[in-house]
Image (cartoon, helix red, strand yellow):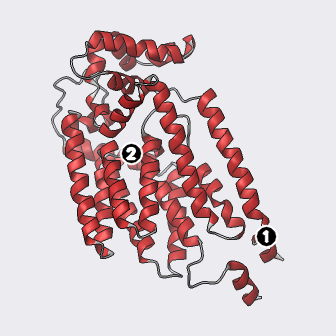
Amino acid sequence: MTASVVYWRGWKALSLVLLAGVVLYFIYFAITRPAWDWDMVPYTLAALSGGAADVAAVNAKTWAIVKAHLSDAEFAGLISSDAYRRALYSDAAALASQLPLYESKLGYILLLKGLSVFTDPIKAMMGVTLVSTLGALALLARQSWRIAGIATLGWLLLIKLFGLNASMTNPDMFITFIYMVGFAAFLDRRFGLAAGVLIFASVVRQDGVVLNLALAAAMVALSSTRAGVVLAVGSVAAYLLDTSIGRHIGWWPNYYFTFVEMQPNLTNFNPPFSAQLFLSVLGRQFVVLLHLYWSYAALAVTMLSAILLARRSDSVAGLLMLAILGAAVLRFLAYPSVEIRLYWPIVFGLSMILLHVAAPSSQEGAPQERAGRLA
């Protein structure tokens, strides 16, 4: 009785209906209720800046575009919610000094510049996020489709657990989708394709080099040495390109800015390094992490994946999981943010591994057949 319900053939049809509903939900809310975040301001400025562009003129155009998208109340809240924002709104030079924090996401900025030829940068951000979210959803649904029975709805639980979002005006969903494409290629043993996609991810966001080096090591361990070396070298090159062209302020100034004190003007910003301060921030953020539900959801997904992996031989999925987990630890140690959006590539990568190992391998029979044999 239980097996007949679990492996009811109608689950896949229901999954398709729910998928269509979620797609419409994402499209509707991305258009009608975008999440207006402060970051859209400097990203808009970065998309409009370049060459000998006049700072004051670009600043004025940036605020005009932002204001056109927001109601008066939303705009007032955006620019006056704290002293930091009030300072940046009133000082064009100070806002321009923040650009290195954003222009180091070189691939994303270049994409926005290209799309801004046809539309304004904020609409471009909204479009990129929506397409990326739908792409990520499609990849999760593809992985789930390989699983028989009720588990084919796994994609729905995972997007709810980790907050897949189509309404943000920043590159987080875009970079997540790129990584998910890379993970899908990795799981399919297409390591050359995976290396190319993952290098592109490092161009889009420079801190991807940490995850990419871990993935390169996994490729080498899987005897795909050429792809691993290409990924490692390409990712380091992309990191150097991003940080040099984007004029990034450096690891410690960025760390200090984020976790100690946000400075309105980053011109010549170079606080002295303090090991005590570094460790204090790390400890404080770790305590916060222990109280966040998503960290336990990620742990649950990891544990379930490990249990399933113990019952089958899949070195590719196993090493991929180890690489992702190792990179997550290193990333937290270097930059202990607890915002889930920065860990979306990690948690949705783990989600793809879970769905992959939940599907029957080629050596196993269909679940219905196994249930019948057990009966």
Callout 1 amino acid: Trp
Horizontal side of residue 370 vs 9, given as left or right: left
Callout 2 amino acid: Gln
| Residue at the (45%, 71%) spot, across then down | 317
| Residue at the (45%, 55%) spot, across then down | 181
Question: Mark 2, mark 1: which one is toward the viewer?
Answer: 1
Q: Position of residue 156 (x, y in %)?
A: 65, 54
Q: Position of residue 52 (x, y in %)?
A: 21, 17
- Mark 2 to mark 1: distance in Å? 45 Å
Q: Quadrant of residue 15?
A: bottom right
Q: Nearer the viewer, residue 354 or 200?
A: 200
Horizontal side of residue 84 vs 275, given as left or right: right
Q: Is residue 317 visible?
A: yes
| Residue at the (63%, 39%) spot, across then down | 26
At mark 2, the secondary structure is: helix
At mark 1, the secondary structure is: loop
Q: Residue furthest right?
A: 1
Q: Position of residue 161 (x, y in %)?
A: 59, 51
Q: Is residue 299 visible?
A: no
Q: Quadrant of residue 371?
A: bottom right
Q: Verify CB contact (< 8 Å) between mark 2 and mark 1.
A: no
Residue that carries the numbered disc 2 in the rendered image:
285
How crowded pointer 1 is (Cα within 10 Å; few <14, some 14-19, many 20+) is rated as some
Horizontal side of residue 297 vs 17, given as left or right: left
Residue that carries the numbered disc 1 in the rendered image:
8
Q: Is residue 241 above or below residue 19?
A: above
Q: Position of residue 45 (x, y in %)?
A: 35, 22
Q: Quadrant of the N terminus?
A: bottom right
Which comes before the other along the chain, label 2 or label 1? Answer: 1
Q: Is residue 228 above or below residue 279?
A: below
How crowded pointer 2 is (Cα within 10 Å; few <14, some 14-19, many 20+) is rated as some
